[in-house]
Amino acid sequence: MEKKILVIEDDSLCLQLFKSMLSSAGYLVETAENGKIGLDKVRIFKPDLIILDIKMPIMDGFTVLRNLEPDEEGDLIPVIVLTSLDQPIEEEKARILGAKDFIRKSEVHLKDIINMVKKYLK
């Protein structure tokens, strides 16, 4: 069965890039352009992993993290935070709220994202 990934990101170019890259790697990918839409899609799509931006209109990534609910087994969906924020305090806050990993957009390579996704979707 294909693993499902939800990408929540307000930059449409990033959304398309991630959808294309992750689909090519064999994942079923859904996208959301803000946190409110993302939370709605979590409930409907039931992703195995979420890639989440922090700075977004309507609802930011921190609010999404606060509002994620455990799945049927009581586990939280793994979340990889992808952001342009460059403050260690932001990373710490994301981890406290349940993020598994934190990637700065300025430091990321597409191969790194695929490797990170594979790590959490074993």
Image: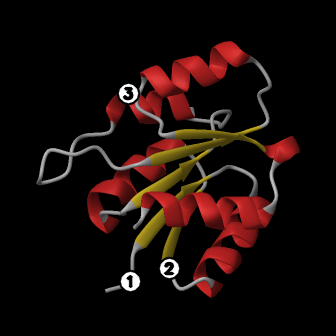
Mark 3 or 2: the one toward you = 2
- Quadrant location of residue 110? bottom right
In this view of the protein, can residue 59 be seen by the observer?
no
Amino acid at dot 2: Tyr
Residue in view at x 45 percent, y 57 percent: 120
Task: Give the CA distance from mark 3 to mark 1.
Answer: 27 Å
Q: Are marks 2 and 1 in contact (CB under 8 Å)?
A: yes
- Which label belongs to residue 66? 3
66 and 114: which one is in front? 114
Q: Is disc 2 surrounded by few (<14), some (14 to 19) or many (20+) residues within 10 Å? A: some
- Which label belongs to residue 27? 2
In this view of the protein, can residue 61 be seen by the observer?
yes
Residue 16 relative to residue 73: left or right = right
Looking at the rendered image, the quarter that the N terminus falls into is bottom left
Say which residue label 1 marks: 2
Instruction: Reply above or below: 63 against 17.
Output: above
Q: Is disc 3 surrounded by few (<14), some (14 to 19) or many (20+) residues within 10 Å? A: few
Q: Is disc 1 surrounded by few (<14), some (14 to 19) or many (20+) residues within 10 Å? A: few
Q: How many tags in the picture? A: 3
Dot 3 or dot 2: first in sequence order is 2
Residue in view at x 51 percent, y 74 percent: 29
Amino acid at dot 3: Arg
Dot 2 or dot 1: first in sequence order is 1
Residue in view at x 42 percent, y 65 percent: 121
47 and 38: which one is in front? 47
Which secondary structure lies at badge 1?
loop
113 and 37: which one is in front? 113
